[in-house]
Image (cartoon, rainbow, N blue to C red):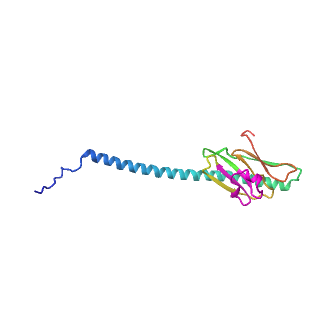
Amino acid sequence: MSRAWRGDERAVSSPLGYVLNLGIVAVVLVGLGTAGTVFLDTNTDAAVEGALETQGNSLAGEIQAVDRAAAEAGPAESVDQRATLATSVRGTGYSVEVVNASVAGGAAAAVEHAGECERACLVLVTDEGDVRTTVRFVSATPVETTRFDGGPVRVHRPAGTDHLRFEPLDDAG
């Protein structure tokens, strides 16, 4: 005895269909949320890296300006310039490593990323260490290998010396 199904008879109940639909919607929303989070994290890191590069290029310009002024000044004259760097980029703090790769051991070992430079460079790293960028620069006057937190800094060549130094300043300085 074969029986034909009528349009109003169903093999699946309404509550089960409702639960299945909710499950599908939940899976889709979790997938979209995960993809959105990855997309946002990637874009945030790229924005932070761009901001670090901007700060690094600004400092490299100040270093080169002091280098030119030092070349024109006599050895008994002090030369300095204030570099107005932001204290944070995109809401996170950062540090600046000034690397003079020609200095072997000693001072170069004091900075974590000394191996990233062939000559002179700046390595800017977020406080969490998850984003960093390297900015190279050219300076006839040797630079002192050092590390300091982001923010205003004085780039100077003290009288009677043959290298550039970096002195972090407070915001009012």
Expressed as whole percent of the image width and height from the top left, the position of residue 100 reads 75, 56
User: Residue extending furthest bottom?
Assistant: 118
Expressed as whole percent of the image width and height from the top left, the position of residue 27 reads 39, 50
7 or 23: which is nearer to us?
23
87 or 134: which is nearer to us?
134
Give the tally of numbered discs: 0
Which residue occupies 61% across, 51% down? 131
Magenta segment: does it hold 110? yes
Which image quarter holds the N terminus? bottom left
What residue span does the magenta drawing correspond to?
97-125
User: Residue extending furthest top?
Assistant: 172
Magenta segment: does it hold 67? no
Which residue occupies 72% across, 56% down? 121
Expressed as whole percent of the image width and height from the top left, the position of residue 156 reads 80, 49
50 sits to left or right of 60: left
Expressed as whole percent of the image width and height from the top left, the position of residue 108 reads 74, 53
18 or 7: which is nearer to us?
18
User: Residue extending furthest front?
Assistant: 105
Which image quarter holds the C terminus? top right
